[in-house]
Amino acid sequence: MAGRRAASIRALTLDLDDTLWPIWPAIERAEHELHGWLAQHASATAQRFDVAALRGLRETIAAENPHWGHDFTRMRHASLVRALTLSGDDPAHADGAFAVFFAARNRVELYADALPALQALAARWPIAAVTNGNADLQGIGLAAHFTTTVSAREFGIGKPDPRIFHEACRRLEAQPHEVLHIGDDWALDVVGAHGAGLHSAWVRREGDPTMPAGAAQASCVVRDLNELVAWLDD
Ligand SMILES: [Mg+2]
């Protein structure tokens, strides 16, 4: 049954990383699989750069190229080209190395509540994924639940800028005040959605659910997505 709160909502926008799955276990596993691949195909690079050094190089590249914004794919690929070049290996291996990283990064383990909640929500509303990351919903197997994906990488502007939220609303054919944004990050998801005129649900899986002081307020704070579905039914 759609409740009173649900009645005023016409569409949803949904963050991905750390809202539907924990991202760091996937990134750490992906970094290790990447290193294993380099050990086989570009051993000088694997010897010169351990996992931590590759991560450091990726951060250096990001710092050197602030204009790349949220294009994590480009940063990772460029850091691999540099590591291979510095080590005397063929920089063309960056393509294969990145493919291994990206496949592992998308083998995420969903939170237990994520899939049932996503199914319940998608049955009632069109949903746009709004992400600053480079998750591949097709590869993860969740694309069918989403009307569209607005990624900072493809759109060129990331959260908390209101423009990425407005782009999602446009694709959902809804006005911002008719849309509820759901996400784990206070600054990006709640303050960002508030600034764009959307409602927001803060998914606070662990820690203090007290809302930080400031102008932005979440419409609700939930510990998981089951609570969000229940809140929408209320
Ligand atoms: Mg997130």
Image: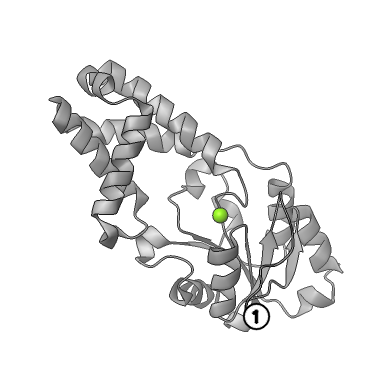
> Is residue 171 in view?
yes
Image quadrant containing the N terminus: bottom right
Nearer to us in this view, 15 or 115: 15
Q: Position of residue 127 (x, y in %)?
A: 60, 64
From the viewer's perspective, tell me whether residue 133 is left or right of residue 124.
Answer: left
- Residue occupying the point 71% across, 60% down: 121
Q: Quadrant of residue 33?
A: top left
Q: Which residue is label 1 attached to?
A: 178
Instruction: Answer whether residue 107 is visible to the viewer in this image.
Output: no
Asked whether mark 1 lies closer than 8 Å to ligand 1, one says no
Residue type of the residue flagged with mark 1: Glu
Q: In the figure, residue 94 lies in which quadrant?
A: top left
Residue, x 62% and y 52% (percent of image)? 19
Outermost residue on the front side: it is 213
Rendered residue at 30%/47% (across/down) = 75
Left/right placement of residue 88 relative to residue 232 reads left
User: x and y percent of residue 48 in the render?
Assistant: 24, 22
Residue located 68% across and 75% down the image: 217
The C terminus - image quarter: bottom right
* Displayed quadrant of residue 58: top left
With respect to residue 92, does 135 lie above or below?
Answer: below
Q: Secondary structure at mark 1?
A: helix
Residue 66: image location, x then y, percent: 28, 59
